[in-house]
Image (cartoon, rainbow, N blue to C red):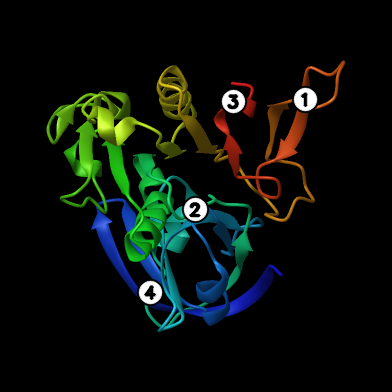
């Protein structure tokens, strides 16, 4: 059951000029969360702010989120410091299904690197074969990079010059064959990655990052269009927070 918890910030560090990495103590969320899920965090503004879970430490009962400053709410949350008491709702949403015996291609654009990092941690811990491709605008925006990742930048000042699809094109035939693609990032990037996967006969899943006001499916702010299951309908509306945020790529109406 998703619950609201009064938690304490354990630590905070800045990954770059505008992105904070915050560790939060909450044994319940740390024990229940799985990749692709998110939490809603309160600030002095009216609405909570959603953040994909970036890492968990079950032994210590903590989880981490990445906070990129884009407005007043994220500015306040990025300023949280160790010892601060905060209100957290989670874990929320339906994340990625990770199965033994399958292999995966994880693709992250911008802040999508945080939920992808969680998936990478879980897969590495379970010995599941996978490769990570990540894309950023420029070198200054790179966060949570790992030497094993395929890195791309639009500016070409780090890694491969280009976007995530340019990085995907460097994968070997063996890496691509029979893989499942999981993607988190801006909508145009996820659409391009989904098309890349489909053209190669691969199943792809995307995490739809809409504004999620309540996080529990009540307010209907975060609806997206999904292909209808019933005959005679062009599409259905699904709630990203409750029905997603992860959906099969081919079901999303882009």
Observer-nearest residue: 240 or 251? 251
Q: Disc 3 to disc 2, how far (Cα)? A: 20 Å
Give the total of numbered labels. 4
> Do the numbered discs 4 and 1 sit on residues whose CB atoms are within 8 Å?
no
Q: Secondary structure at mark 2?
A: loop
Residue at 34%, 65% in the rendered image: 125
**Nearest to viewer (mark 3 / mark 4):** 3
Image quarter where the N terminus lies is bottom right
Q: CA distance from mark 4 to mark 1?
A: 45 Å
Marks 3 and 1, the one that precedes in the sequence: 1
**Residue 140 percent coordinates (x, y):** 19, 42
Labels 4, 1: front one: 1
Q: Residues within 10 Å of mark 2 (few under 14, many from 20)?
A: few
Label 3: how many residues lie within 10 Å, few (<14), some (14-19) or many (20+)? some
Give the number of the mark in front: 3 or 2. 2
The secondary structure type at the circle numbered 3 is helix
* Quarter of the rendering containing residue 4: bottom right
| Residue position marked by numbered label 1 in the rendering | 228
Q: Earlier in the sequence, mark 4 or mark 2?
A: 4
How many angstroms separate mark 3 from mark 1 (CA)? 12 Å
Q: Nearer the viewer, mark 2 or mark 1?
A: 2
* Labels 3 and 4: the sequence-earlier one: 4
Q: Which disc, if any, is residue 99?
A: 2
In this rendered view, identify the residue nearer to me: 9 or 229: 229
CB atoms at circles 3 and 1 under 8 Å apart? no
Query: In terms of image quadrants, where is residue 37?
Result: bottom right
Residue occupied by mark 4: 81
At a point 31% along the width and 25% down the height, the residue shown is: 165
Is residue 9 shown above or below 124? Answer: below
Q: Secondary structure at mark 4?
A: loop
Most distant residue in the right direction:
232
């Amino acid at each position: 059951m998703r619950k609201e918890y009064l938690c304490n910030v354990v630590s905070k560090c800045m990954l770059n000029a505008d992105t904070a990495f915050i560790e939060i103590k909450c044994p319940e969320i740390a024990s229940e969360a799985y990749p692709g899920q998110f939490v809603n965090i309160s600030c002095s503004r009216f609405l909570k702010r959603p953040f994909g879970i970036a890492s968990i430490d079950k032994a210590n009962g903590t989880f981490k989120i990445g906070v990129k400053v884009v407005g007043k709410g994220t500015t306040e949350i990025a300023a949280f410091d160790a010892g601060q008491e905060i209100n957290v709702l989670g874990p929320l949403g339906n994340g990625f299904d990770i199965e033994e015996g399958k292999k995966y291609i994880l693709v992250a654009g911008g802040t999508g690197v945080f939920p992808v990092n969680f998936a990478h941690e879980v897969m590495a811990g379970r010995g599941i074969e996978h490769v990570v491709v990540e894309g950023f605008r420029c070198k200054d925006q790179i966060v949570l990079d790992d030497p094993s990742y395929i890195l791309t930048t639009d500016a070409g000042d780090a890694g491969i010059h280009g976007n995530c699809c340019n990085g995907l094109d460097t994968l070997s035939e063996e890496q691509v064959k029979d893989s499942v693609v999981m993607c988190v990032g801006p909508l145009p990037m996820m659409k391009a990655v989904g098309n890349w996967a489909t053209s190669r006969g691969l199943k792809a899943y995307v995490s739809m990052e809409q504004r999620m006001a309540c996080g529990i499916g009540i307010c209907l702010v975060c609806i997206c269009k999904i292909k209808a299951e019933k005959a005679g309908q062009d599409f259905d509306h699904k709630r990203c927070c409750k029905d997603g945020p992860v959906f099969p790529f081919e079901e999303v109406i882009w």
